[in-house]
Amino acid sequence: MTDTAPTIWWVRRDMRLTDNPALCAAIDRGGPVIPVFLLDEVHDGYGALPRWRMGLGAEALAEALEERGSRLVLRRGDALSCLRALVRETGARGVVWTVLVDPDAKARDSAVRAGLEEDGTEVVRKTGHVLFDPWTVETKTGGCYRVYTPFWRAVKDRDLDAPLPAPGKIPAPDTWPDSALVADWGLERPMRRGADVVRPHLTVGERAAQGRLGAFMAQRVDDYAAARDIPSQTGTSLLSENLTLGEISARTCWHAGLEALRQGKAGAETFLKELVWRDFAHHLAYHTPQLTSGNWRPEWDAFPWNTDADHPHVRAWLQGRTGIRFVDAAMRELYVTGYMHNRGRMIVGSYLCKHLMSHWKIGLRWFADTLRDWDPASNAMGWQWVAGSGPDATPYFRVFNPVTQLDKFDKNRGYEGRWIAEGRARPDPLALAYFDAVPAAWGLTAQDRYPDPVVTPEDGRRRALDAYENRTF
């Protein structure tokens, strides 16, 4: 029994026990801690795979909490209403959460904070989703950074505290409030038959994330700088899936990278730069929130992109049947695994926006529905970077040639062969899995003829450059 009122730890994108400042702050307040996850108004707006993956992460966190004598309470509904109800039911005096900076999360959290404080409930907000909080990184003139390289130089030598250990025990209340089950929410239903195909490719939970980091540092970080560009290899860390839900902290990854750098592992600095690239996306989303919903450079509002997502060329792109092998292989990887190699993301993005002259928002929405590592800031920055409408020192008229890119980064055609089945006597099982993942209504089979290009690299480049030349800004 305790005379100290409980504290609610509102779990969002911090589904871990190690290096979790919000959880530690809740414990430090004394008294019981009630971990709570809400399927709220922001989460209800997520795409099919990110919502389902988030639910799987919540289940993994619930198991980890139970091992420490705690629980994860699950509720669905408006965040403020749910938290107010839980405060009434439990007698909690405070709610603790980790700060998020994307516009939708900020708007929700501001309303929740105002409502709870009006009720007399204390709100404690802790940082920990990124390495360097956006408001702590400024140019010499006091503004935000708009180009990555100066941002990297500004933060690369900063000291970061060591990661916090996981608590040995999380104080539990005498009586737990009622809880839903993730299974009650049916988050897998929008995935339809694709859920069974994608599930084996997911790496869920804190323990798995830590294992993934350890394996990368032991086996692959040395070659990371070069191997990360070869899509037929497992040359990357694959940690983006876990970082986006906070199943591992960026700070934990940073210190592991620093240790690898001290050991002389050649790719460690490139890995650290990629962690800072993620921070840069959140820096921009905080300081220039239009990044996630409109052209970062407003002059691009007048550019004549196609906005029809049902255009036949866009449908071919969505189905991975453009006739451009690098593009199609990458889109099929996405259907089967919920993931796409970073080089593939650049190629499919460039092909959609440049060769097909279609709006980056079409791609943004598709990735938001299909990526297991979807992150609102990183997704938006990536699409605007490749479209030319976003923050980038490289000229907007850069147009990737998907054929020469395949020649450069998939010389032996291992990536193409892994994902494209048509025309092969013995297709790779992963290539065949694509036909199990896509909607049956498409009527696609491995025996179909592989399509001719809907737009050739040469015609697409010429059309894009003509449009840029005749732009009105």
Image (tube, rainbow, N blue to C red):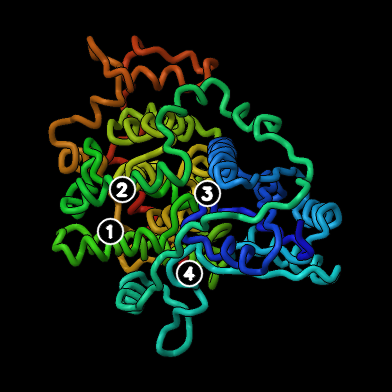
Name the residue: 38% across, 60% down: 252
Of marks 1 and 3, which one's residue comes earlier in the chain? 1
- The x and y percentages for residue 243 are 44, 52
Residue depth check, mark 2 versus mark 3: number of the one nearer the observer: 2
Q: Which residue is mark 1?
A: 271
Instruction: Tell me the element at label 2.
Output: loop
Name the residue: 30% across, 63% down: 272
Q: Which residue is mark 4?
A: 283
Of marks 3 and 4, which one's residue comes earlier in the chain? 4
Q: Which mark is residue 237?
A: 2
The amino acid type of the residue labelled 4 equals His
Vertical side of 133 occupied by 459: above or below: above
Instruction: Tell me the element at label 3.
Output: helix
The amino acid type of the residue labelled 1 equals Phe
The amino acid type of the residue labelled 2 equals Ser
Q: Which mark is residue 352?
A: none
What quarter of the picture does the N terminus occupy?
Answer: bottom right
